[in-house]
Image: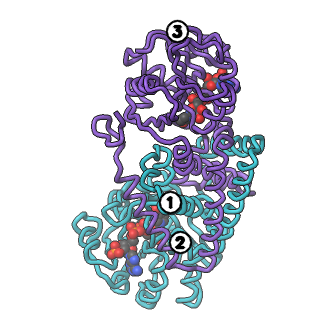
Chain colours: A purple, B cyan
């Protein structure tokens, strides 16, 4: 049970966690903190938060749990502001899409990463933003990856795990660098391709016609290009090394594939497409969403 | 009204047209033609076709409408086989995803493109194949692009248009080369990215984990990588020039984007992502599917 949750960032991720915890009766009071009065008022009207402030230092007063859900570029400023204002036993955790950056930010601000800071990342989301887009079921049966460090306090880790389980999630653990590599591949890289494709097409002369003749597959393929540009700028910068390496490699592969097509090398094309179809079938269609009861990866 | 439809290729595209025309009472008899007895038997059992043969020359006997829905690489062989076996007034049309190639195939086989050949392409489909995946609503309110040539017979064109309208589609016209350029952008290029991404990830050492942590966005983004590899090999070869040019350019842009990320150039990233989000919103979300009654593009 969380007595007082300080929610720094009351958008899709923070708002959905608040709603889920409230629904599960797992939290006493929730104090929201954000930039604009508008979003905070909406959060209050929706019953997502019980009180609000625009100052993180005020938000964390007396909080036993602090959840950071602001864009990654805003994290360091928040940590600077809350330093020295936290309750002695307060646990800090976050929902950021990159884990190396919060570890670096915390080390820079606190001198070393606090034992009661537990980096985390829910593998759930939509392309919409703000508290209006939040909903309590967002984390149901979705994975949350926690990336504790050697110095992480086991009680703090356990409290964060319990919080996510109360929200319906399946909690797993991973090494910080490994998390950032895996997510670069499965999430950050696809977002770059979707943004890049839509941007390329929008710059074509006949872009009007191009988009008019886009079929259903194109809509699905480019849906993630509707995601929040600021959030994605911050993710790119926070995971720059892993992502830029992977994207550069993908760029080269597409240049090679273009040459294979130009040469009309049908055997090579068939190899690539068959391998991809088989892999997608095996991994994506074959793997059902995690179930809390039976997930082999759920660390206990 | 079509008296006798020869369906060369009874898969998703051909089967769905047959079912739609049958449902609309717009066709008398349907003769299916394919490679495997298995798929043809299934088509017969499902009531999609009234008779079948594995010889295109036999299938087109007495047919007043011939619809080609085989992979593009098989089109020339079919045209060679049906040459001289067609009814005098028979109209030939197709559903191939590239239009330059059938024009070239027909010119090679018949010496010149027959006046009663009307190249066409329904902008509808799924990632599934075979007659078992076909359904009568596939073309409802979806666009079909016809790409007539200067020599195309107007009566033949009108008959093909009427056929697609009976199937529920919205028919528009376009120049052959323009069609192939537009489709390279909206369909062929995205398929290359999806196949390429899944293939790249499948070749990573920790591919198991990578796919396990793929969220919903990844499933949508890569769904088209489950499409038929043979069909896509043929599309790539048939549209090699337009597609390879566009893919090479995309490859370069991704290499540049990787460098922008490596440099942590946030302003440039924000520009790209914002432009893409705006374009997708304006063109994809803003454009509702075509309505037969009010579509300004429907040529009459
Ligand atoms: N969206 C996803 O699919 C997803 C999935 C997993 C993880 N994440 C991570 O979750 C975090 C939040 O994402 P979200 O989708 O919840 O974003 P969101 O809906 O845009 O919400 C962001 C919240 O942070 C506040 N905020 C923005 N900039 C700020 C700043 N400079 N200083 C202080 N507060 C600021 C916003 O307040 P105002 O509304 O007043 O600006 C808003 O309350 C990000 O780190 C992201 O990487 C997102
Ligand atoms: N799928 C889409 O989303 C989509 C959308 C628009 C246009 N198209 C175009 O529609 C055409 C057909 O695609 P589809 O999705 O309907 O494919 P499909 O479901 O795989 O059906 C193809 C049909 O062609 C037959 N066939 C395959 N290879 C052949 C060969 N070498 N000689 C004679 N017959 C052969 C198959 O017979 P067996 O089953 O016996 O092999 C099957 O009946 C393609 O040109 C494609 O470009 C597809």
Quarter containing the C terminus of chain A = top left
Disc assigned to residue B235: 2
Residue bearing the label numbered 3? A50
Q: CA distance from mark 1 to mark 2?
A: 27 Å
Residue B14 makes an appearance in the image = no
Question: Is residue A295 shown above or below B49?
Answer: above
SS at mark 2?
helix
Q: Nearer the viewer, mark 2 or mark 3?
A: 3
Q: Position of residue A243 (x, y in %)?
A: 63, 50
SS at mark 1?
loop
Q: Position of residue A245 (x, y in %)?
A: 64, 55
**Residue beneath the point at 51% across and 20% down:** A91
Question: Is residue A79 shown above or below A45?
Answer: below
Question: Quadrant of the rendered structure where residue B5 is?
Answer: bottom left
SS at mark 3?
loop
Residue bearing the label numbered 1? B204
Ligand 1's image quarter is: top right
Indicate yes or no: mark 2 CB to ligand 2 under 8 Å. Answer: yes
Mark 2 belongs to chain: B
**Residue beneath the point at 29% across and 81% down:** B53
Question: Quadrant of the rendered structure where residue B238 is?
Answer: bottom right
Residue A120 makes an appearance in the image = yes
Residues tagged by mark 3 and mark 1 found on one chain of the structure? no
Whether residue A228 sits left or right of residue B136 in the image: it is: right
Q: Nearer the viewer, mark 3 or mark 1?
A: 1
């Amino acid at each position: 049970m969380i007595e007082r949750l300080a929610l720094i960032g009351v958008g899709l991720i923070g708002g959905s966690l608040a709603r889920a915890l409230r629904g599960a009766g797992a939290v006493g009071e929730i104090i929201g903190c954000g930039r604009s009065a508008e979003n905070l008022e909406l959060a209050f009207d929706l019953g997502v938060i019980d009180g609000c402030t625009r100052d993180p230092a005020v938000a964390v007063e007396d909080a036993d749990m602090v959840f950071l859900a602001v864009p990654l570029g805003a994290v360091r400023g928040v940590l600077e502001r809350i330093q020295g204002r936290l309750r002695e036993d307060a646990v800090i955790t976050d929902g950021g899409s990159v884990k190396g950056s919060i570890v670096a930010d915390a080390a820079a601000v606190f001198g070393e990463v606090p034992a009661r800071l537990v980096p985390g990342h829910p593998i759930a989301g939509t392309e919409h933003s703000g508290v209006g887009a939040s909903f309590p079921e967002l984390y149901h049966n979705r994975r949350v990856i926690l990336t504790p460090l050697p110095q992480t306090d086991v009680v703090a880790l356990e409290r964060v795990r319990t919080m996510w389980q109360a929200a319906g999630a399946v909690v797993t653990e991973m090494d910080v660098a490994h998390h950032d590599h895996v997510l670069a591949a499965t999430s950050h890289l696809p977002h770059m391709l979707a943004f890049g494709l839509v941007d390329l097409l929008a710059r074509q002369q006949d872009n009007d016609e191009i988009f008019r003749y886009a079929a259903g597959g194109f809509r699905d393929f480019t849906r993630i290009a509707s995601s929040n540009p600021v959030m994605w700028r911050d993710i790119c910068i926070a995971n720059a090394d892993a992502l830029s390496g992977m994207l550069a490699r993908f760029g080269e592969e597409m240049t090679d594939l273009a040459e294979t097509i130009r040469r009309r090398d049908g055997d090579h094309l068939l190899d690539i497409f068959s391998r991809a179809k088989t892999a997608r079938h095996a991994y994506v269609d074959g793997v059902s969403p995690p179930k809390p009861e039976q997930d082999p990866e759920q660390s206990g």
